[in-house]
Image (tube, rainbow, N blue to C red):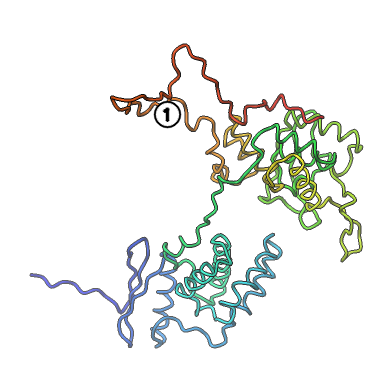
């Protein structure tokens, strides 16, 4: 019987492991060693470094240089570069200062591993101070930092990629996006519009009937409104008191619905039809104190304050501006039979996956035939049974869904 061939360790080997991982094996003066990684490219890079060190007479994995800076020192230039390319720079800087720096700031890159990351995740979740989605953003930011450090040869692997699935599940958001409230009837939209001051009401109508974000509404100018072509060209937004690119950096065209067209036509005649649609009000005093200038744009806080009072006067639940405008538009659009693909285009979502959160509102989700899929009478032989089926010749009142109280094309916001 031929002898079983022994596996070669000295030259190093790369083997596929369980769960899509890759394992490297090598032998040096200290014995045999093995280590696994999440992807093949990382495993090959580490194996090449190991074999290079063996040729130089060094053993083990590449040793970290004594002069390697700490993460607090490395993150400063990384955030400086990120400021020019990411709008979330301010949030990232705050996350590092408040959450990541106390846990990892004094460590060197190679000292951060999956065990320390799991301890950080469990600690922040157990305190109850951070939601899973916030912890996920912190870990995602740390992953971006380590990808940059890999390019600079400070580390060979990204420890975030080493996290097992059980740890990643801890960071799944517990918020059900389908539970986000909205104005459930067009009659409620009309009552809120009439309860708002004219300028605030027009801004509210643009958000509720065009689905624009708050910054996109405040950034509209009259040159973006095509009254004849019934289109709104969304190409910028207002952020922190200045013009900024759109969230997805992709301009889009939104249709000008029948309910909104006469409102904008009347507002154009009143304001002159030049410049911004919405200018600062008396409540928007102060401007930019650092520059000593008057405010250029209407503030979101002004919209929110007036909306809060309008909802209270109408006897409606307290909702945010986003829920009363953008989320209301998307929800009523789907309830009215609009397709998710068209809604994705109107909302400016980068993927239809984001738009699918509204799929539970489709009127055809539970068609009438679905209720008869398992049609059988389970009533007992004796005793009176209340039938849920309409009796022949008996008039059964029809329940009208909330979205059918008024057709979109029949709604008039003009009081």
Between 159 and 209, the one nearer to me in the picture: 209
Using the rendered view, name the quadrant where residue 253 is placed. Answer: top right
Residue furthest front as drawn: 383
357 vs 65: above or below: above
Residue furthest left as drawn: 1
62 vs 86: above or below: below
x, y percent for residue 414:
81, 29
x, y percent for residue 16:
33, 64
Q: Residue at x 58, y 62 (%)?
A: 134
Q: Residue at x 58, y 67 (%)?
A: 129
Q: Is residue 351 left or right of residue 257?
A: left
Q: Residue at x 50, y 58 (%)?
A: 172
Between 60 and 104, the one nearer to me in the picture: 104
Using the rendered view, name the quadrant where residue 380 is placed. Answer: top left
x, y percent for residue 38:
41, 65
- Residue behind mark 1: 370
Between 78 and 280, the one nearer to me in the picture: 280
The residue tagged with tag 1: helix, strand or loop?
helix
x, y percent for residue 351:
57, 45
Q: Residue at x 81, y 52 (%)?
A: 299
The C terminus sits in image quarter: top right
304 vs 328: above or below: below
The N terminus sits in image quarter: bottom left
State the count of labels. Answer: 1
Q: Is residue 286 left or right of residue 391?
A: right
Using the rendered view, name the quadrant where residue 81 is placed. Answer: bottom right
Crowding at dot 1, Cα within 10 Å, few <14 / some 14-19 / many 20+, comes out as few
């Amino acid at each position: 019987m031929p002898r079983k061939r022994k596996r070669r360790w000295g030259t190093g080997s790369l083997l596929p492991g369980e769960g899509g991982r890759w394992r490297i094996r090598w032998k040096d003066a200290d014995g045999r060693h093995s280590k696994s990684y999440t992807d093949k490219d990382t495993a090959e890079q580490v194996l090449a470094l190991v074999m290079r060190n063996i040729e130089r007479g060094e053993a083990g994995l590449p040793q970290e240089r004594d002069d390697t800076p700490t993460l607090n020192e490395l993150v400063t230039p990384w955030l400086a570069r990120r400021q020019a390319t990411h709008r979330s720079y301010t949030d990232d800087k705050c996350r590092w200062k408040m959450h990541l720096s106390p846990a990892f700031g004094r460590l060197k890159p190679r000292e951060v591993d999956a065990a320390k990351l799991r301890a950080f995740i469990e600690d922040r979740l157990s305190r109850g101070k951070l939601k899973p989605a916030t912890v996920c953003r912190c870990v995602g930011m740390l992953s971006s930092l380590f990808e940059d450090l890999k390019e600079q040869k400070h580390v060979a692997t990204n420890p975030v990629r080493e996290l097992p699935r059980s740890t990643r599940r801890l960071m799944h958001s517990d918020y059900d996006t389908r539970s986000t409230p909205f104005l459930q009837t067009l009659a409620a939209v009309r009552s809120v519009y009439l309860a708002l001051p004219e300028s605030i009401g027009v801004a509210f109508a643009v958000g509720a009937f065009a689905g624009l974000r708050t910054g996109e509404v405040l950034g509209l100018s009259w040159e973006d409104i095509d009254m004849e072509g019934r289109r709104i060209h969304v190409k910028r937004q207002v952020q922190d008191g200045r013009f900024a690119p759109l969230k997805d950096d992709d301009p889009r065209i939104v249709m000008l619905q029948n309910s909104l067209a006469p409102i904008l036509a009347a507002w154009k005649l009143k304001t002159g039809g030049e410049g911004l649609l919405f200018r600062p009000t008396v409540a928007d005093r102060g401007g930019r104190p650092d520059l000593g200038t008057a405010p250029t744009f209407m503030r979101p806080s002004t919209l929110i304050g007036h909306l809060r009072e309008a909802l209270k006067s109408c006897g409606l639940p307290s909702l945010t501006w986003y829920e009363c405008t953008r989320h209301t538009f998307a929800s009523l659009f789907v309830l009215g039979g609009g397709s998710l693909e068209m809604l994705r285009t109107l909302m400016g979502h980068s993927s239809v996956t984001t738009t699918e959160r509204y799929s539970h509102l489709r009127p055809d989700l539970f068609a009438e035939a679905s209720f008869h899929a398992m049609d059988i009478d389970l009533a007992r032989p004796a005793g009176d049974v209340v039938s849920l089926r309409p009796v022949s010749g008996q008039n059964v009142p029809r329940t009208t869904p909330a979205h059918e109280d008024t057709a979109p094309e029949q709604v008039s916001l003009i009081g």
